Structure formats: C-alpha cells, structure tokens
Image (cartoon, rainbow, N blue to C red):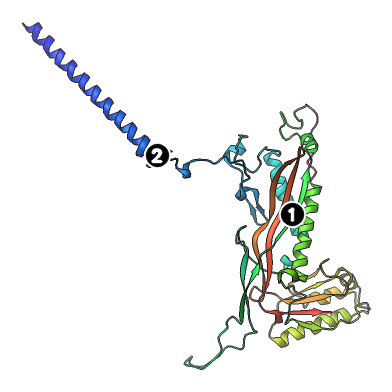
Amino acid sequence: MIIMKKKRLFDRVKETTICLVVTFSCIMFISGIGNFAFGDGPQGRSGRPDASKLISGTGNYNADRSKECCNGSAGPSQKERKGGNDTGSFFLEKPLGHEQLEQMKRTVCNTSRKHLVGRKFIKVYGSLGAGAQSVPWDTYLPPAMANIDLLGNSEHQPVGTQKRTFLPIPQIYKDFILYNRDLSATGHKQGHKGHNDDGCISMPLDLSTLENAVIQCAKMEDDMIFNGLPEMGIPGLTTVEGRNIIPMKDWSVLGDGFLNVVEATQKLAETGFYGPYALVVSPHLYINLHRVFEKTGVLEIQRVKSFMKCGVYSSNALKGNTAVVVATGQNNIDLVIGEDMGLAYHGPENLNHRFRVWESAVLRIKCPQAICTIE
C-alpha cells in the first residue's frame, strides 16, 4: 500500500517537472522570436538591418580616414592595426601597409609646412568640410574711435558690414603615381622584418613624387593668396581694390628697402591699422635685404624685422620687384579652409597606383585698407 502511494507521488512529480520544462521551453522560444523580429539585434524592430550597427563594405575610400590635415590625422581602425581585411577602408586593394600610409601623411604635413608662406601670418578659418563650396565675404570700413561718456547714451556709428557677397571655395590638387614595382620592392607585406615576400631585402619607400605634388599645391595656394583668381572673382593681397599703394624705391641702393618698409607702415598707421605687420617680398628683393650697413655690422633685413613683428618672408608667388605689407589679424584677412591639404587614392591604373594631394581654400580680405603694396 505504502509502495503504491510513493509510486503515484513520484509519477505526479515527474508529470509536473515535464510540464515546467515544456512551459519554460515555450517561453524561451517565443522570447527568441520576439528578439529576432522586434528586439535590439542587428535586424531592429522593423525587421530591416540597423544601419548604425552594420559596417559598409562598398569598396570606396573612407573620406574621414583618407584625409590628413596638417593639424592632425585620423588613426587606423582596430581591424587595420591587426592586419585584417577591411573592404570599406582607405585602400580598395591595400597597396600600402599602415606604416607606409602614416609615412605619407607625415610627408604631406612636413612638406606643406615648409613651403606654405601665406599661412605663416594669415589666420585660418575652418575647416568647413569637403562639401563647402562657398563662404560669406563681408567687407568693413576702418572703424572709428570708440565713444566715452558717463551715461553711454551718445550717438555713435557701430561697427558693421559695409558689403556682403559670397566667395567660391576652389579646389587645389595635384596627382602623383606610386609604381607597383616600387611598392613591391618595399616589402610592405613582409613575412619578417627587412625582407619582402620573395625573401629579398626590402627597400625604403621613395616619396619624391608625393613631395613634389605637395610643393606644387603649396605654390598654387600662395599664388591664390597673393595674386588672386580673377576668373573666379577672388582677389589677392596684391590685386584687391582699395588697398594702399606706394612707389618702390631702388632696393639695390643700401637702405632704400628699409625706407620703403617704414613708409608702408606709416601709410597703414594713417589709415587706422597699427599692426602687427608682416612683410612678404619677391626672392630678388629678399636677397637685396641681406646686406650689411656700413660700419654697423647689422644686416638691412634685421632693421626691417624690427618693424615687422609677424615676420619677413619671401614668396615665389611675387614676381619682379614687388612687396606687400599686411596688418595681420582675422578681423582684416583670413584663409577659409574647406578641407585641409591631404591625400586621396584614385585606384589602380595599369597596375600602378594613382593618388591625389588636394585641398579646398580661399582668401577672404575683409579690410583692403589693411594692405599696402610696394610696386
């Protein structure tokens, strides 16, 4: 009798356990379907892929990682650092290793800093992004003196815009080629340090073509800054209407260059611009300034620099006997940057690799009276 009761009790416990297991399994199954269709997984609640959690593999270069500004660089992804194959990365076919890409970026920065003249005394505005195609251009009159009284109710003319137009932001670019055989000789896919895939000693990457492309872009930027782009309605420091102009003395005569610079600063001070000043001259005039005053042991350019607190520079963009003195400051002039100078990859071409150095920028002259050219 007792044995029969224990057996019935065991059967009931068994049936209850089975029911609980089945119920729990059903709940988990239903929950899984809900997460698949409506949860926070990759499919999202709509059943469509959630773009924020998927990685695109279009094969196009990534603009954020393909650009190298002079002020910084975008780092590699975690997958690139581990040597993975990321189809949405900068290079479609991975012609370069990460170290070589970083070397190219450093070359762009270092070379551009050496050769850009205008940026050494002109403030930069931006960057606005690669898609920026125009920028507002406000011009101002030299402001009058501020008022002073006890109650602050006297009539006065506020500082405001005299005229507003819009300037286009042109692109400056130069292409260059890295040859496939040269890249293969560098052994960027090396099995061990110092050897390429064929077991030969690897060679350093020669970036002469890149440096030449950067130099040409820097020259074009300075040419735009000093001479403007008349066909696009962009004025330069030596061509803008409303600037001050004084005649040039004979700088081959010792001391005449210094007297010319003093005269230019006096002209700007009379207009209401008290510095700091920067002087840019043609290479020919720059050489003439490196002469010693008689019985003083002082170079003429040293005396000129005592007036030019923002520096004395030479630029190939100025031809012949041309010089310009500028009262610096973003309130007078600035350089609008759409996208700073960097690298882009065209793609393979006849088994070689074509790249582009490019930027977008425009000079914005707000007060032409802050400029004095010596012509």
SS type, badge 1: helix
SS type, badge 2: loop
Q: Which residue is mark 2?
A: 47
Magenta-highlighted residues: 200-206
Verify whether residue 178 appears in magenta.
no
In this rendering, the answer to whether 313 lies above or below 340 is below
Sequence-first disc among 1 and 2: 2
Number of labelled discs? 2
Alpha-carbon distance for marks 1 and 2? 50 Å
Residue 74 visible at all: no
Residue 94, image x, y percentages = 68, 38
Name the quadrant containing residue 45: top left
Q: Amino acid at mark 2?
A: Gly
| Structural crowding at the residue carrying mark 1, measured as other residues with C-alpha within 10 Å and reported as few (<14), some (14–19) or many (≥20) | some
Residue 23 visible at all: yes
Q: Nearer the viewer, residue 311 or 241?
A: 241
Q: Amino acid at mark 1?
A: Asn
